[in-house]
Image: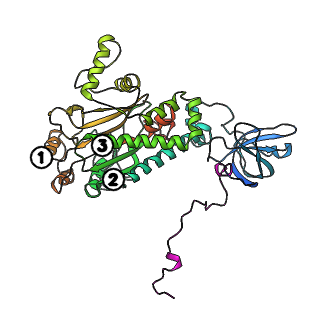
């Protein structure tokens, strides 16, 4: 025996696509040529007739599930919402909805369903579905959202892997609020009268992983993080949540905004393309019932480059509109003023009619870490605005010059001792670098056509609401 042979226990595993679970999903069964099969899932609907009955069974793996054909006696065992196992033969379906259906010869009820089950075969409002968050994923909209959400995260990860980025994990608990906005949740031990007792200093739920990602990028060159973030904003708009997910990327050795915009555009386009390729039924559902322009808009966004304009150019566009119609905008469009949602939507939805980068905002409008431009008035930053959504991405070159960054932090009246580690990154081998963050739920609004971020996250949290 070769004494250098690798023991069987430690030999490299062969990771095939074969499922390790005993039952196949409905999605897989419909693709295969199997004859006798076993289907497990939840009853979406039952149509009981004298000669033959029909039931729709769904396990979440696809939009339509599978239609089951039963005799009258067996159909009496089924109720909407029940969890069942059906055995039978896959046969060709005469209908157009799907190519195969299940001719049932054996039924086992795995979990009975009470008659108070609130999801019936009819359209429910999003507000009602949100009130039964523990069940809404069993409906078409809820399950389609989760499949698109999964595909979008796959597309993002595929893009960054191909671009040689390292996935890293930034802290949930932090000692800073990143942008200095103060809209943070402070951590307080439940049995403590003194908020700082546990950590001996104030600690917060993270509002962004950016500053920590810059630490990683200063060693690994290209990194990204994908995780939950928290904002204590008392906002009830359709675009804000107290807990949401962020994709944040940081990259070293870029000298200006252009490569940063290229990466941002590529990540959004490839993610959109991946969802188009893998969730065609779900997108068709959203296109039919939510936004009839969805598919046209998504295909257009991956076929054409995004528009790019400076903040100054954007203000000039908005001012020309306001000159023609003084009541067109509620908020002023003067240089130095913030772009409001109405301005962002006009630029993306009406003027450009496609995604648009707005770059180089006035320094006074942006956080301390953004790199100062040569003009002394603006910073090297951008927002990506989408039709119907508004701002999706915010990013910038980061200020890598120690003296300039130090002065900007002093001007912002920041606690220099707390952020000395951030300055140290500029003292010990500083590199030009930049990054951006994508609000994942806003990306899902773009991909589904839904209008409220509360509909695209399983358990939404906003001011006054933390149910389930």
Between residues 223 and 232, which one lies in front from this camera angle? 223
Q: What secondary structure characterizes most of the magenta part?
A: loop
* Location of mark 2 (residue): 223
Picture coordinates of residue 217, whole percent (x, y): 28, 54
Q: What span is in magenta?
A: 1-30
Viewer-side label of 2, 1? 2
- Distance of mark 2 from mark 3, alpha carbons? 13 Å
Q: Residue furthest bottom?
A: 1
Q: Is residue 331 above or below residue 56?
A: above
Name the residue that disc number 3 marks. 260
Residue under pointer 1? 403
Earlier in the chain: of badge 1 and badge 3, it is: 3
- SS class of the residue under badge 3? helix
22 is within the stretch colored magenta: yes
Residue drawn at the location 25% of the way across and 55% of the way down: 218
Q: CA distance from mark 1 to mark 3?
A: 24 Å
- Secondary structure at numbered mark 1: helix
Question: Residues at badges 1 and 3 in contact (C-beta under 8 Å)?
Answer: no
Along the polypeptide, which appears first: circle 2 or circle 1? 2
Residue 437 in the figure: left or right of residue 282: left
Q: Where residue 275 is drawn, which disc sits there? A: none
Residue 184 showing in the rendered view: no
Cα separation between marks 2 and 1: 26 Å
Which circle's residue, 2 or 3, is located before the other in the chain?
Answer: 2
Question: Marks 1 and 3: which is nearer the front?
Answer: 3
């Amino acid at each position: 025996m070769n004494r250098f042979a690798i023991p069987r226990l430690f030999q490299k595993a062969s990771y095939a696509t074969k499922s390790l679970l005993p039952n196949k999903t409905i999605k897989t069964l419909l693709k295969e040529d199997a004859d006798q099969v076993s289907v497990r899932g939840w009853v979406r609907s039952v149509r009981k007739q004298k000669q033959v009955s029909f039931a729709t069974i769904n396990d979440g793996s696809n939009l339509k599930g599978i239609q089951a054909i039963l005799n009258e006696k067996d159909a009496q065992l089924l109720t909407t919402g029940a969890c069942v196992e059906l055995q039978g033969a896959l046969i060709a379906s005469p209908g157009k909805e799907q190519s195969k259906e299940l001719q049932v010869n054996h039924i086992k009820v795995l979990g009975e369903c009470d008659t108070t089950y609130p999801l019936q075969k009819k359209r429910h409002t999003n507000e009602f579905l949100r009130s039964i968050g523990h069940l809404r994923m069993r409906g078409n909209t809820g399950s389609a959202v989760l499949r698109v959400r999964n595909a979008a995260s796959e597309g993002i990860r595929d893009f960054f892997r191909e671009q040689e980025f390292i996935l890293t994990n930034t802290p949930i608990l932090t000692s800073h609020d990143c942008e200095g906005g103060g809209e943070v949740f402070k951590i307080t031990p439940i049995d403590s009268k003194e908020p700082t007792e546990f950590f001996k200093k104030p600690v917060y739920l993270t509002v962004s992983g950016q500053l920590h990602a810059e630490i990683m990028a200063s060693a690994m060159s290209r990194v990204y993080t994908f995780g939950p973030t928290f904002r204590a904003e008392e906002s009830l708009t359709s675009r804000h949540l107290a807990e949401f997910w962020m994709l944040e990327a940081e990259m070293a050795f870029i000298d200006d905004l252009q490569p940063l915009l290229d990466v941002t555009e590529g990540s959004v386009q490839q993610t959109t393309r991946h969802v188009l390729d893998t969730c065609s039924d779900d997108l068709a559902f959203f296109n039919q019932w939510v936004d009839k322009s969805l598919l046209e808009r998504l295909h257009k966004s991956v076929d054409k480059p995004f528009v790019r304009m400076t903040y100054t150019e954007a203000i000039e566009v908005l001012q020309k509109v306001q000159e023609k119609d003084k009541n067109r905008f509620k908020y002023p469009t003067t240089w130095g003023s913030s772009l409001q949602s109405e301005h962002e939507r006009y630029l993306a939805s009406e003027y450009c009619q496609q995604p648009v980068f707005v770059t180089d905002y006035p320094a006074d409008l942006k956080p301390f870490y953004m790199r100062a431009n040569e003009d002394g008035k603006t910073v090297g930053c951008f927002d990506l605005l989408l039709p119907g959504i508004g701002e999706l991405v915010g990013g910038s070159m980061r200020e890598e010059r120690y003296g300039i960054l130090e002065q900007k932090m002093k001007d912002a009246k920041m606690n220099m001792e707390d952020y000395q580690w951030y300055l140290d990154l500029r003292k010990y081998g500083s590199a030009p670098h930049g990054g951006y963050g994508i609000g994942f739920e806003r990306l899902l609004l773009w991909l589904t056509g839904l209008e409220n971020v509360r509909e695209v996250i399983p358990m939404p949290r906003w001011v006054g609401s933390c149910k389930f």
